[in-house]
């Protein structure tokens, strides 16, 4: 049985008109999974991870892309374009291809995780790799889409934000109310903007008694919002948040301030620690950027912040299989033995 999809589920909450083509690749309705062992480490009452890696292309980008592609098609667009650290292009290429639209993507040279690249190739995107970073790529996409009849599908496109806000709706529907805290990675800052929009809209509709504190985390080498100025050469292992000048900067700080939350940063070592803890203590294999929220939560807990009695949700933004290189690189030595039972028994010390 196929899932109904966001455009069918939330027509009242989304900018859908009689002319909007409705379709789905099965996005949305992702699991909210509790992590009891990590709850003990953090010292909170309830800790959940929203598994956005369960979306059709393996990241939350699909929520916004289904809306953006539907509106592009409604407007008669034939070509869509985006700059991407990987997941936006994978999602754009998949959703556009399903509707007969062409996709052009601009990516920073050598910085796209292997799985994301494979997706863009398979969905038939026209791929341009530039000798520059994401921020430069986005700048060029903005100029090109203003000059030619090509629709921009980065999160500057307001329909992306509209689609992505449904993640907040689902959390409230499953928990029966908003959580106390929402931990989320911050790159171009579209998603923290979208979640805040979703939480405030559902609160106004009376579906939640309160809104959560929005806790955004950037990587230390790409933390413009924390530092208060653009980062010229952003660097982090978490390529999905390797962004030095976020497009939704002001909206992200507004979400932070209106919610009483914070935007802080975590180092690559802290991200990698959380990446491994998620996999080994919660059964959740996410991509490095998606481990930033847990890294931030652990950092706050270690610095003495008490989360006792709190209900916390972290957004696990993307699937770990997107970036297998990072996982394999960190492997301990794999034991190599002959195909001999006693040698294996001895090595594993099972007895
Ligand atoms: C895009 C992305 C982010 C960052 O989201 P923004 O909306 O750019 O802040 C984080 N994690 C993953 C896996 C992503 O694909």
Image (cartoon, rainbow, N blue to C red):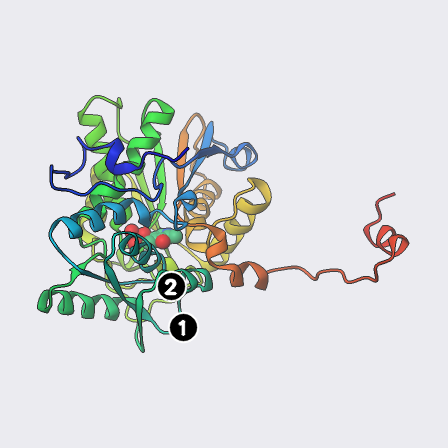
Q: Secondary structure at mark 2?
A: loop
**Quadrant in the picture for the N terminus:** top left
Q: Secondary structure at mark 1?
A: loop
**Residue 298 locus on image (x, y percent):** 47, 44
In front of the other: label 1 or label 2?
A: 1
Quadrant of residue 188 in the image?
bottom left
| Label 2 neighbour load within 10 Å: few <14, some 14-19, many 20+ | many
Which residue in the protein does label 1 denote?
Answer: 110
Residue 223 as seen in the image, left or right of residue 47: left
**Quadrant in the picture for the C terminus:** top right
Q: Evaluate whether residue 270 shows in this view.
A: no
Which residue in the protein does label 2 denote?
Answer: 221
Residue 330 as seen in the image, left or right of residue 57: right
Q: Evaluate whether residue 34 shows in this view.
A: yes
Q: Which numbered disc covers residue 164? A: none
**Residue 14 locus on image (x, y percent):** 18, 37
- Which residue is nearer to you in this view: 334 or 200? 334
**Residue 296 locus on image (x, y percent):** 42, 47
How many marks are shown on the rendered structure? 2
Q: Residue at x 33, y 71 (%)?
A: 108
Name the residue at the front extreme. 100
Q: Is residue 212 above or below residue 149?
A: above
**Residue 290 locus on image (x, y percent):** 42, 50
Say which label, 1 or 2, has the lower sequence index: 1
| Label 1 neighbour load within 10 Å: few <14, some 14-19, many 20+ | few
């Amino acid at each position: 049985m196929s899932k109904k999809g966001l455009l069918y589920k939330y027509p009242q909450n989304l900018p859908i008109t009689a002319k909007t083509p409705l379709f789905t690749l099965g996005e949305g309705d992702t699991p909210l999974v509790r992590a009891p062992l990590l709850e003990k480490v953090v010292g909170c009452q309830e800790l959940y991870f929203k598994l956005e890696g369960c979306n059709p292309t393996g990241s939350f980008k699909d929520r916004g892309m289904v809306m953006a592609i539907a509106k592009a098609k409604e407007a008669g667009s034939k070509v869509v374009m985006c700059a991407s650290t990987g997941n936006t292009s994978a999602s754009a290429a998949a959703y556009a291809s399903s509707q007969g639209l062409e996709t052009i993507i601009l990516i920073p040279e050598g910085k796209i995780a292997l799985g994301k690249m494979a997706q863009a190739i398979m969905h038939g995107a026209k791929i341009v790799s530039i000798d520059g970073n994401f921020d430069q790529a986005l700048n060029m996409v903005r100029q090109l889409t203003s000059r030619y009849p090509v629709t921009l599908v980065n999160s500057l496109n307001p329909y992306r934000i509209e689609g992505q806000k449904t993640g907040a709706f689902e959390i409230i529907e499953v928990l029966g109310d908003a959580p106390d805290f929402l931990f989320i990675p911050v790159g171009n800052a579209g998603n923290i903007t979208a979640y805040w929009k979703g939480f405030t809209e559902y609160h106004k509709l009376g579906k939640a008694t309160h809104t959560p504190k929005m806790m955004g985390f950037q990587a230390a080498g790409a933390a413009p919002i924390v530092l208060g100025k653009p980062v010229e050469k952003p660097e982090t292992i978490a390529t999905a948040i390797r962004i030095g000048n976020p497009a939704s900067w002001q909206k992200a700080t507004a979400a932070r301030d209106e919610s009483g939350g914070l935007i802080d940063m975590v180092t690559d070592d802290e991200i990698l620690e959380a990446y491994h803890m998620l996999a080994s203590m919660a059964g959740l294999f996410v991509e490095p950027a998606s481990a930033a929220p847990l890294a931030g939560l652990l950092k706050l807990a270690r610095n003495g912040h008490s989360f006792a009695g709190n209900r916390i949700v972290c957004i696990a933004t993307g699937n770990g299989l997107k970036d297998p290189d990072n996982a394999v690189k960190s492997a301990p030595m794999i034991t190599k033995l002959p195909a001999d039972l006693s040698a294996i028994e001895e090595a594993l010390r099972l007895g």
